[in-house]
Amino acid sequence: MMKTNSIKTAVFFTFIFSLLFSLRPSAAFSQNSPADAPTLKGKNVVVVFGGWQGHQPTESAALMVPKLKAEGANVKVFESLETYTDEQIMAEADLIIQMWTMGEITNPQFKGLEKAIMNGTGFAGWHGGMGDAFRDNLKYQLMVGGQFVSHPGGKIDHEINIIDQDDPITRGISDFELKKTEQYYMLIDPNIKVLAISEFDRARYSKPGKNENKVTGSTMPVVWKKNYGKGRIFYSSIGHNLSDFDVPEVLTMQMRGFRWAAEGKYHPQENTISPIYSK
């Protein structure tokens, strides 16, 4: 009987310890959110998914939609770019999250998307769902702030370096490692506000039999924000594998980016121009 009571006591204290530990703020992200912090609660969020299946658009929607709803967002999900031509849906949207790789966007579709963003609707996404879409539309690429061109080395381990610790999206987050996932090389707008970068630090990236330019020693923006008209744009190139979101830092930045982008209609425009080159 004494042994049984000891086991029960041990289980009880283990439960209490675990509960207290789970309530403790994370060392990596501990901060008090101000009352006016960006939020998805009550926001109208439009999710548009489709395109090339290699980036798992259906699975991406299945992953993110519950997280958005858990924060109190009013989420509408569509599997067609024609959604961008629906004036009512676009006018009501606070945030559009796109999960669409490659493909083509028609002029009416792009005009509908652009009009909504110019009027204050946020536009956000990650990896190929936003940064490798509509390669023939230069104005779309300008709007996003960058476009995928390569992932040298394929799926590799690499480090993400936070370069702006003052921005609310990255505040409290330290440098971290990603395992066996794509490190995007992109053409970018030199005026975006860059929050995180990665360095191409391997000795060689070219594949056997291919004469590719070596990019060793170069750095590339990974996470950024910008304005387009009255709208807020947030992009992260992390996320080729959905398991990348199992890394707490990745999911934290993505959700914070969604919240920030959804506030374009409700707060004064933030200065996000951060030129790389200056006289």
Image: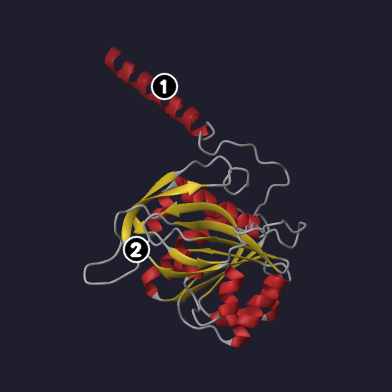
Q: Position of residue 273 (x, y in %)?
A: 67, 59
Q: Is disc 2 placed on a helix, strand or loop?
A: loop
Q: Is disc 1 placed on a helix, strand or loop?
A: helix
Q: Position of residue 176 (x, y in %)?
A: 43, 44
From the viewer's perspective, tell me whether residue 110 is left or right of residue 51: right
From this viewpoint, is residue 1 visible?
no
For the N terminus, the quadrant is top left
Q: Which residue is mark 1?
A: 13
Residue at image location 27% in from the left, 15% down from the top: 3
Residue at image location 49% in from the left, 57% down from the top: 222
Q: Amino acid at mark 1?
A: Phe
The mark found on residue 218 in the picture is: none
Residue at image location 61% in from the left, 37% down from the top: 31
How many dots with numbers? 2
The image shows residue 137, relative to residue 192, as above or below, that is below
Q: Position of residue 206 (x, y in %)?
A: 29, 65
Depth check: 243 or 169 in front? 169
- Residue at the left extreme of this rendering: 209
Q: Callout 1: 10 Å neighbours few (<14), some, many (20+)?
A: few
- Residue at the bottom extreme of this rendering: 107
- Residue at the top extreme of this rendering: 2
From this viewpoint, is residue 203 visible?
yes
For the C terminus, the quadrant is bottom right
Depth check: 231 or 159 in front? 159
Q: Position of residue 202 (x, y in %)?
A: 32, 53
Could you give the CA–CA distance between mark 2 and mark 1, rounded to whole angstroms? 56 Å
Image depth: mark 2 or mark 1 in front: 2
- Residue at the front extreme of this rendering: 279
Q: Which residue is mark 2?
A: 214
Q: Amino acid at mark 2?
A: Lys
Q: Earlier in the sequence, mark 2 or mark 1?
A: 1
